Amino acid sequence: MKNCDSNIKFGDVPGDIVSIGKEVRHNAEVIFPKILQLLPEVMERNPYKRAVITVCGGSGAGKSGVASLLTRYFEDMSISSYVLSGDNYPRRIPLYNDAERLHIFRESGIHTLLEQGEYSEKRFRILRDIRSTGDDADPEYRKKYPWIAIYQDGGKEGLRKYLGTPSEIHFGQLDRIISSFKQGEDKIWLRRLGREDTELWYDEIDFSNTQILLVEWTHGNSDYLTGIDISVLLCSTPEETMYYRKARNRDLNADSPFTTMVLAIEQELVERQAHKSQIIISRSGELMEPKIENGPMLNAYPDSMGGTLGDIVEILNMPELNKAFTSFYILPSIFHSDLDRGFSIMDYQLEEQLASEEDLKQIRDMGIDLKLDFVLNHASVRSMQFQDILSKGRDSEYKDFFIDWNKFWEGHGSMTTGGYMEPEASLREKMVFRKPGLPILMVRMPDGSEVSYWNTFYQEVTCENGDNRFPGSTRLSYQGQMDLNIKSPMVWDFYADTLKRLASYGAAIIRLDAFAYASKEPGKKNFLNEPETWELLNRIRNMADQDKLTLLPEIHAAYKEGIHEKIAGKGYLTYDFFLPGLILDALEEENGESLAAWAREQVEKGIRTINMLGCHDGIPILDLKGLIPEERIRNLIDLIVKRGGRIKELHGKENIYYQVNATYYSALGEDDRKMLLARALQLFMPGKPQIWYLDLFMGKNDLKAAGGSGDSSHKEINRTNLTLDQVKEKLTQSAVQKQLALLRFRATFPAFSFDAKIRTTCEGSKIEFLWEKGDFKALLSADLHTMSFHITGKRSESEILYEYKSMVIIQE
């Protein structure tokens, strides 16, 4: 029986029941405006102005009702549409398909018992009696007969190889229908499948006036289905799925243990394919943010490989890198910037010589999501806003966009002969500085007066003739990164506009650079002020949520301060800046106890991280304080320097060490075995692994680029740009190929997930990591003394899907 609303077009499954209650109506009303936002671009690409939308989700999630209501809304806008039900395309009618599923479960279960030597005539008689009741999938039997676990797990594995595959479904027919529709065909034969073996026929449907084809189906996101333009995912819990499935009364045994098992497998498929959906909504009508998965993330500048982002797109399309990465962190020289290799941003438009929106789209089309930077604390002197101040002085509308130092400290210091306020000593002593002296830049206004602006990081002032003494000069040239005044409404408008722009590029993760310096108050450290910094982040998060952006606050601080734990406790991803030093320490000490302890702490405290070995900055050292003994920290510094690294200390203060600049490969003594073991350890540590491009290609210290004894160019030691020919040559190297093999395993094996179970054990040089999700297990066993390791990927205990021994791929 159909829903009685005669103005609604329903799907085309014969005799299907469509229930449209308040929840379904609400969800359709939430979804429809989102579709309208995406539709113009989709239809513009199609010469016939047609689009294919899928409404997918678990059984009973409300797909039929939502799809039917969407057609009604389209009709109200004079947009013609048709609902095609994927349930017409199984190879067998429901009765026979249910029987085939049960047959596969039982045959696979028996076969697994035989394979493992657990089959006997006695056990078969027990199974036969249980089968007669139809309860042989019930896990309760495991308590009485432990061997039944082997039977049930084997049967479940057999079902996994059948459900939602071409063995069960005519995907080819659906592909041809979608292709024909998008190619402008007017009349297409569509399949009709009833519940009896006599109820199979085809109807010729006239699509001459149809613009939208709505495919409502559990498997609408399947990898076997092509041509979908917009995907809508209706989420539901297993309990909700079962409730609504029973309410529809389509199955005689809707709540049986076997049906429950089938639904659980289908739910796994739906969740695994969720990343394809542009619109995700819960059963209760809440738009949901797509989950950030924890697969490997490439990290590079847009010109790091080949010279442009377009060249990197070409590299990512090479078969050697296929399925190695699920994300890409593109450093901020992708935007208009002038200093600090991108971190002094003029504006967030793309740097045309390095990247285009088409490059970003091609990366997203590969299934690789984007991580981009948002620098909260400052903007370049060459930004439009600061240039307006230099041009118009106190008449500039942006005069309060940056922090006027003297106004800030008014009443909290005294004026100097230099024209700037000197904060009271008691207040100044509390502050954190990133360079010697007060963080100010004296800016000459058009009338010749000077105004001091807050400048935490880099600055440089020169005369037009290059004389740094400025005698009588009225034209000065400025470089620097000027701190933004977060108390100005214009700054918050700028923040909102920037997040919108980054979302328009397709960003999934936004790295908040220098966020801890943004909040400033007299009498505070002006670095991670509390509670002001958290209030700032919460306000940013509210804006980011509108565009479904995940925030990653970036901060370096000693472990003993616990700042990483505070950030994680407030629901943010956080950087694991401890890992690079911990892995170096573990390999050099031939002892993994500290590394294992940090892994266990992340799991126990629910800390979700993005981890790394190398990166565009140096190897973090400050962060290790309180995590490993001071003597071992100093030993690491000495070792990396001995291998060519350069120390960076905080504004020249001796022993206030911050980081050591070096490639990770050189820090490891340019030892391939150590590099591969370090990579394996990184990939099995909790978190989402970020991969610096130069680490992947076994990059060595660039001592020439690092310059002399000063630290201004130290970071260039680990930023060597590679040509396309160099990349191609390096892809032939064994150690590079083996890293890529490990990355593919990490990116594709189902045991790896933020919600997986992770166990870590260690005894001296022997360390193990075990990841488990569902029936999948991934195990790393490593010996830090011999630098050997063994990786296995299993589905249940019986089937090894992947194996890697030391430096030789055994099976993949």
Image (cartoon, rainbow, N blue to C red):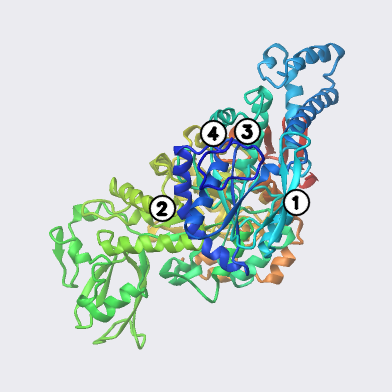
Residue type at numbered disc 3: Gly
Q: CA distance from mark 4 to mark 1?
A: 30 Å
Whether residue 554 appears in this view of the structure is: yes
> Element under label 1?
helix
Task: Give the structural element (helix, strand or loop) at label 4.
Answer: loop
* Quarter of the N terminus within the rendering: top right
Left or right: 239, with 222 as reference point: left
Q: Which residue is mark 1?
A: 173
At label 4, the amino acid type is Thr
What residue is at 73 percent from the left and 19 percent from the top?
A: 136
* Displayed quadrant of residue 319: bottom right
Pair 4/1: label in front: 1
Compare marks 4 and 2 and give the one earlier in the sequence.
4
On the question of residue 435 being in view, the answer is: no
Identify the amino acid type marked 2.
Gln
Residue placed under numbered mark 3 in the picture: 764
- Name the front one of labels 4 and 2: 4
Q: CA distance from mark 3 to mark 4?
A: 43 Å
* CA distance for labels 2 and 1: 38 Å
The image shows residue 751 at horizontal and vertical percentages of: 65, 38
Residue denoted by label 2: 546
Q: Amino acid at mark 1?
A: Gln
Q: Measure the alpha-carbon separation of dots 3 and 1.
A: 58 Å
**Helix, strand or loop at disc 2?**
helix
**Of pointers 3 and 2, the one earlier in the residue sequence:** 2
Q: Nearer the viewer, mark 3 or mark 4?
A: 4
Q: CA distance from mark 3 to mark 2?
A: 48 Å
Coordinates of residue 726 in the picture (x, y in percent):
70, 69
Q: Position of residue 52 (x, y in %)?
A: 61, 56
Q: From what the image shows, is residue 522 above or below residue 238?
A: below
Q: Nearer the viewer, mark 2 or mark 1?
A: 1
Residue behind mark 4: 237
